[in-house]
Image (tube, helix red, strand yellow):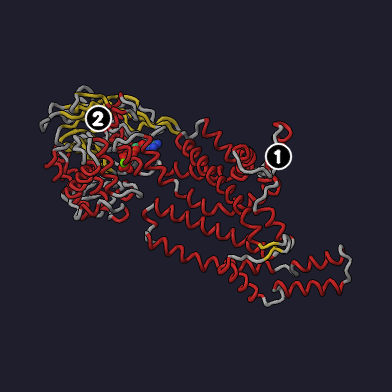
Amino acid sequence: MAKGDRLLDVVDLSTHFRTEEGILRAVDRVSFHLDQGETLGIVGESGCGKSITAKSVMNLVPQPRGSIVGGKVLYHGNNGTVDITSYHHQSREMRKIRGNEISMIFQEPMTSLNPVFTIGDQLMEAIMLHQRLGRAQARQRAAEMLARVKISNPEQRLDRYPHEFSGGMRQRAMIAMALSCNPQILIADEPTTALDVTVEAQILNLMQDLQDEMGMAIIMITHDLGVIAGMADRVLVMYAGWGVERATTEQVFYTPKHPYATALLQSIPKIGVRKRLTSIPGSVPDLNNVEGGWCYFAPRCAEAMDICRQKEPPTFDDDEGHTVKCWLWDKQQTGIKAG
Amino acid sequence: MLSYLIRRILYAIPMLLLVSFFSFIVINLPPGDYLTTVQQQLQSQAGMSRDQAVAMAERMRARYGLDQPFVLQYANWIGGIVTRGDFGYSFQHNRPVSEVIWVRLGWTLLIAGLCHAVSVIIGVLIGIFSATHKYSIGDNIATVFAFLGLSIPNFFFALVLMYLLAFHAGVHVGGLFSPEYVLAPWGWDKFVDLLKHLWVPVVVVGLAGTAQNMRIMRGNLMDVLNRQYVETARAKGLSERKVIYKHAVRNAIQPVIMYMGMALPFLIQGEIIASIILNLPTTGPSFYYALVNQDMYLAGSFLMMIAVVLVAGNLLADFALAWLDPRVRYD
Ligand SMILES: Nc1ncnc2c1ncn2[C@@H]1O[C@H](COP(=O)(O)OP(=O)(O)OP(=O)(O)O)[C@@H](O)[C@H]1O
Ligand SMILES: [Mg+2]
């Protein structure tokens, strides 16, 4: 497969939770795509559905309350195109993809590794599962992977337990594990949020080096626009379960369309200085109590119009693939920005 | 790891000495001794005069060393155990304590061990089922069972079971053998007869432990299943069975094993009650009568043995934990 080929088409993905208060629309008709070798950033406030989107792609939606209720996740793998949402989450077909063709690393390196098994055991487990290798060969491959993520003395470190590793080393080990079967896609769910800034930079550089070497595509989930600016080719901005804007990184940074994206960018005081997203007034609506039929961002939006409170905005697409879910960009109606 | 094992075993020795000393004190606390009881019996049943009885008791006291100072008595007793395996003399049985104690201790350990095994295996299995089928009908039934198991007193359960078995099922209950096998030589039939009797105390004593283990396992496993590393295991592509039995259970079972060490006193306590009701030839009833009659060496030896079993049980539980969880090894 060559760089630039389509790997993933997520079409109108909806993932809901059944809760005591009713149906929670954690992911609501989100679409995006991912090409070979590129990095897609997913950005948005806490609770907007980034992790659940990622878990839906892995078919690992928290059971028993969550389920994918609509849309498709088309994965164009080595064996042709499959719709991941059509597989049962425990099916053999799904398990062959997980950890092998699509892998994932998580936010909390301190708890992502099982405390009672050695690092080596945990790496070898994935390798032996997917690549028909014996113990000795799997061990060798595990050591190679640790060396690849720049952990010194990999042979000895294989026999260490997670509690003997620092946070940064554990995240490296997780990356080694996720990449050990040469996946097409690596999903990184806020991989550096729990780490301090210098370690964060090292881990992000490492991920980019490995991407250059191994050629996998990355879905990078983050709160941090600085990370997006440094790593992503394209960006999906999420708000309250919706994908509100989708564009290249340059487009989002220089010509943002959605008022939420604009507000996010304004919450960065200076270009090049990183800041957490905190300073947009108001907060995300309670996803349990929304009935739909309006724009969830309208209560916080400085440019909100009457229609924003009466009708859900559709997604508008310009010719360059820059999409936005906002009435301001409606050519037919009042869309003042549609030009 | 080896040095950890050795260190822990060495620590146990002074602990056992301390326990034996305090049990000796406790047993000597009630006023009088076994010979006070004997003296009263001589007066009331053998018709001796008070002076004669007192003199006789004094002679026996001198013979058994009961007139010596307390610390010396203790030293003699402990010295005898360590050097000769001599646990002293049981006045009540008129035989050395060691002749009385071993067979009974064997039965106690067998019953307690079976209870332990049953309550851990069944409790853990039901706990796993419950945690992985949260709020299902099976889980609800198991929860009700656990509630009953923890709240029904041992003695009551034993009585109900005896009643049902004797009057409704018409089988022989009480004791470890049917009358015709008590004196029979060991053979297949006798073994089967033993099993037919043994399950009653095992069920009675093991019920609470099973319920307890089930609850601990259920709660812990539900907690562990929410941990990030379980999701990591799923994200690797492991089957759900591997995720649960290899990654989750291994972490969730630790408190059950810790509880195994602490559960022994409850088991022995339950075993005493069940044995008295079911009339079993174990340590329980004779420990009880030794205490009532101030048969001090016998009572002291029972206490000592229970302490040894406890300490050994805790040691085993700690070793199992150290083997299961790398983080406790070097502390
Ligand atoms: N297991 C669950 N049961 C019920 N609701 C859930 C569950 N997991 C997530 N949710 C809900 O789904 C919504 C989206 O959650 P998600 O974890 O995707 O947010 P996020 O964008 O990743 O946030 P963060 O940046 O804090 O990680 C939230 O409203 C959350 O409360
Ligand atoms: Mg998240």
Judged from this view, the residue extending furthest toward the top is: A332
Q: Of the residues tagged 1 and 2, which is closer to the observer?
A: 1
How many angstroms separate mark 1 from mark 2 (CA)?
88 Å
Determine the quadrant in which ligand 2 lies.
top left
Q: Residue at x 22, y 30 (%)?
A: A32
Same chain for mark 1 and mark 2? The answer is: no
Residue B97 picture quarter: bottom right
Q: A96 or B303, which lies in front?
A: B303
Amino acid of disc 2:
Lys
Residue A293 picture quarter: top left
Does residue A15 appear to the left or right of A22 in the view shown?
left
Residue A100 picture quarter: top left
Dot 1 lies on which element?
helix
Q: Which residue is mark 1?
A: B180
Q: Residue at x 23, y 49 (%)?
A: A172
Kindly identify which chain the residue marked by label 2 belongs to: A
> Which quadrant is home to the N terminus of chain A?
top left
Q: A123 or A138, which lies in front?
A: A138
Judged from this view, the residue extending furthest toward the bottom is: B69
User: How far across and down, in percent of the image, does residue B195 sit?
Assistant: 61, 39
Q: Mark 1 Cα within 10 Å, few/some/many (few <14, many 20+)?
A: few
User: How far across and down, in percent of the image, does residue A109 sit?
Assistant: 29, 49
> Which quadrant is home to the C terminus of chain A?
top left
Does residue A245 appear to the left or right of A300 in the view shown?
left
Q: Is residue A258 above or below residue A230?
A: above
Q: Which residue is mark 2?
A: A325
Q: A113 or B281, which lies in front?
A: B281
Residue B298 in view, yes or no: yes
